[in-house]
Every structure is written in structure tokens, then in C-alpha cells.
Amino acid sequence: MQQKKLEEKNGRVIGSMDAGGGQRNEQRFSHGRETTYTPTPGQQLTRSEVRRYTWYALLAAMLIALVFAVTWILFGLFCTKIWFA
């Protein structure tokens, strides 16, 4: 009965306040569709492409870490030499 109040004409729920998690909600929203991704043979990466993407991801992470490290070092120098002097 309550579900009927929440539905629009096209069957969508307007605002369900069901806070329960778990298997019930997953089944309710999946509608029987599979969500697994299977790439076609043209979409799969070669070993060299995977290596290149991994290398560039590592470089990006190291660059971000370097920016944070330099920021903390400069902040430390600012505090000791200018702010607390």
C-alpha cells in the first residue's frame, strides 16, 4: 500500500526512505541485469599498453607526493625562519 503512494505513473519511486542495506536493496534496483563488464577483443589493452598506463600512473602518484613534500618543507622553512623568528 505504501509502495503505491510513492510510485509515479511510470513506476519510478519518488522518495523511498528505506534505510536498510544489504541484499534486499541490491535485488530491488538491479532489475535482473548483469553488471559485469566484458570487453570486446578490440578494447583489451596489450601488455605494453598496460605497462605504459601503470608507469604513468606511478609517475603521477610520485609527482603528487613530491608536491605535498615540497609544500610541507616550504611551510616548515617559513615557520622556522619567518613566522617564529
Image (tube, rainbow, N blue to C red):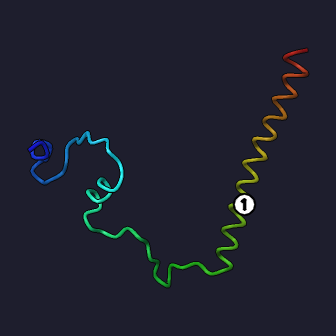
Query: In percent of the image, x 58 and y 78: which residue is there?
Result: 45
Expressed as whole percent of the image width and height from the top left, the position of residue 3 reads: 14, 46
Query: In percent of the image, x 29 and y 54: which residue is there?
Result: 24
Q: Amino acid at mark 1?
A: Leu
Query: In percent of the image, x 85 and y 25: which residue is there?
Result: 78
Are there few (<14), some (14-19), or many (20+) residues within 10 Å of tag 1?
A: few
**Furthest-bottom residue in this view:** 41
Which of the 4 image quadrants contains residue 50? bottom right
Q: Is residue 52 left or right of residue 7?
A: right
Expressed as whole percent of the image width and height from the top left, the position of residue 61 reads: 71, 54
Which of the 4 image quadrants contains residue 72? top right
Q: Quadrant of the C terminus?
A: top right
Callout count: 1
Expressed as whole percent of the image width and height from the top left, the position of residue 1 reads: 8, 44
Expressed as whole percent of the image width and height from the top left, the position of residue 31 reads: 25, 63
Of residue 29 and residue 77, the one placed in the foreground of this image is 29
Residue located beneath label 1 in the image: 58
| SS at circle 1 | helix
Q: Is residue 12 left or right of residue 19?
A: left
Residue 36 sits above or below residue 73 on the image: below
Query: In percent of the image, x 75 and y 41: which residue is there?
Result: 68
Residue 9 sits above or below residue 44 on the image: above
Q: Is residue 20 left or right of residue 7?
A: right
